[in-house]
Image: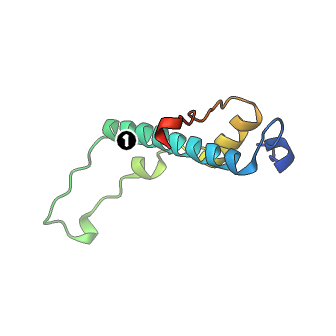
Amino acid sequence: MSKVSLDDLMQDKRNIYETVVVMSKRSRQVIDEQKRLIDKDRDNEPQIETRDTEEFEDVEIDREALMREYTKYPKPSRVAMNEMVADKIKWEFPEKSESSE
């Protein structure tokens, strides 16, 4: 992945603080999406039976589990930054009404 500079993030943006808040909220959304995928993958994995009476020498190593390739997800903050630079994130703040003040 390419590096994202502050100048890239601030193109056509009004406020750096606003940009950081929006990216942090998007990062949390990405985290939640990744957690759902991980939980879904865990439900599909076979369960390994264990016996309480086994001695340490009698335990057989599950080679398949050791060789299994785990999915590596991108960092949520990196995903949010790349989406911000590519203008894939749109946001707006609610209008303040006079009656709520």
The one nearer the camera, 50 or 14, is 14
**Residue 93 coordinates in the image, percent (x, y):** 60, 36
Q: Residue at x 75, y 49 (%)?
A: 16
Is residue 36 among the parts visible in the rendering? yes
Q: Residue at x 63, y 43 (%)?
A: 22
> What colour scheme has been applied to the protein in the rendered image?
rainbow
The one nearer the camera, 52 or 37, is 37
The one nearer the camera, 19 or 72, is 19
The one nearer the camera, 35 or 43, is 35
Tell me if residue 33 comes above or below residue 60 in the rendering.
Answer: above
Which part of the image, by quadrant, shows the N terminus?
top right
How many marks on residues? 1
In this view, which residue lies farthest toward the left? 53
The residue identified by callout 1 is 39
Q: Residue at x 75, y 46 (%)?
A: 15
Q: Residue at x 33, y 35 (%)?
A: 44
**Residue 68 coordinates in the image, percent (x, y):** 46, 45
**Residue 86 coordinates in the image, percent (x, y):** 75, 31
- Corner quadrant of residue 82: top right
Q: Pointer 1: residues within 10 angstroms few (<14), some, or many (20+)?
A: few
Tell me if residue 10 comes above or below residue 66 in the rendering.
Answer: above
- Corner quadrant of residue 84: top right
Left or right of 52, for residue 57: right
> What is the secondary structure assignment of the residue under circle 1?
helix
**Residue 70 coordinates in the image, percent (x, y):** 50, 45
In this view, which residue lies farthest toward the bottom? 56
Is residue 75 among the parts visible in the rendering? no
Kind of residue at disc 1: Asp
